[in-house]
Amino acid sequence: MMVRWALMLCCLLAAGCAAEREPGELFGPSEAGTLVVDALLIVDHPLPDLFVRQTVAPGVRYTDAVSAVTDAHVEVRQGAQVFRYRTDPDSLGRYLPPERPPPVMPNTAYALTVRSEGREARATTRTPGRFQIREVVLLDEETLEVRQRLRTFIDGADQVFTAPENQVVYRDGRLEIRFQPIDVPGYQVGIISLDRNSERVLEDDFLEEEDYEERERQASSPAFVAPDGKLPMPWFVVSFAGRHMIRVYALDKNWFDFARSSPEYQDGGFGGLAGDNFERPLFHVAGGIGLFGSASVDSLGFVLVPRE
């Protein structure tokens, strides 16, 4: 997910390293040395690795060695259970859960505590319930009638990339994801092109050649709400032919607020929330910044076929 990049961007802005911000504009000099936590819990997935960094003063060159916090005491609590994390010797600032970590439970409260050199950061999250994509359809652009129903992973994981109905011609119809909404503030979508050498399909008059070169094979949406359980997928979010994986995340409040307020998503995008404009990301971390959030997720796969 691009959330991790957005958290790194916050550290860079604090150091005055972003091209469009003046040093100290997002975070002042007095906030140098602030703990930055980065932990994303996914329902039914094992308790994850997490990262602890610190902001650096404006004008100081940002590096992993400068920003990483390697001596922290880190623990995650769930009810009476305490999971004590250990430092990863192979990755600065990364902390590992206990051996054989348990899966993250739905509708459950988790609390994070990070202590380092007299500093303490605390955060809590309540995980969403389980989330499931109901169906994926290809609609007629004019009538909006269903032309094609794609196979999902529930129908068979070994068929999502080989089934004829999952071969989708670029810009032929409208792809729509449908799901049963659950009790969460909002959602976020990530899309990944799995075939690293597949050809480019995106062609638009307003794009220059350098714009094409900047297109990446993975991207994510801003946070969005979908009270009707329908998510249309605009064609501009895909640039390459071949197999694609789309993940739809149902977000807790921490993740939702961060995703809709971080600098990475201020330019909007498909599914974005109109009117959102934040001078500073929304953090729900006492004594620090960053994100201790949770989500439930479901995925779909399809093959994008170039137009003849």
Image (cartoon, rainbow, N blue to C red):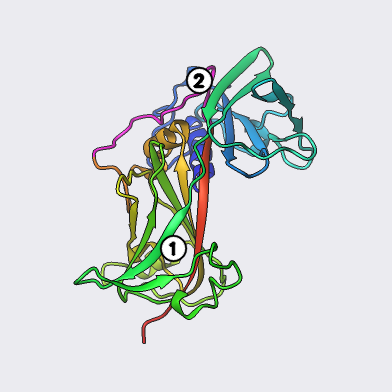
Residue 199 lies, with reference to residue 34, above or below; the image says below
Above or below 252: residue 308: below
Q: Contact, CB < 8 Å: mark 2 with mark 1?
A: no
Q: Is residue 72 visible?
A: no
Find residue 56 and report its horizontal and vertical position in percent: 56, 27
Q: Is 261 on the left or on the right of 53, as rendered?
A: left
Nearest to the observer: residue 238 or residue 177: 177
Give the Cα separation between the discs numbered 2 and 1.
34 Å
Seen at 52% across and 29% down, the residue is 126
Q: Which residues are magenta?
A: 275-291
Residue 140 at what x, y percent from top left?
26, 73
* SS for dot 2: helix
* Amino acid, disc 2: Glu
Of tags 2 and 1, which is closer to the observer? 1
Relative to 235, does residue 119 appear above or below in the rendering? Answer: above
Q: Specify the quadrant of the image occupied by residue 157.
A: bottom right
Quarter holding the C terminus is bottom left
Q: Residue at x 48, y 77 (%)?
A: 199
Q: Is residue 143 above or below residue 54?
A: below
Name the spot of residue 167 as percent of width and height, x first.
45, 77
Residue 142 is covered by the magenta coloring: no
Q: Which residue is mark 2?
A: 31
Residue 284 colored magenta?
yes
Please count the marks in the image. 2
Q: Amino acid at mark 1?
A: Arg
Secondary structure of the magenta portion, mostly? loop
Dot 1 falls on a residue whose secondary structure is loop
**Disc 1 packing (10 Å; few <14; some 14–19; many ≥20):** some
User: To which residue does mark 1 refer?
Assistant: 215
Q: Residue furthest left?
A: 142
Q: Position of residue 75 (x, y in %)?
A: 69, 24
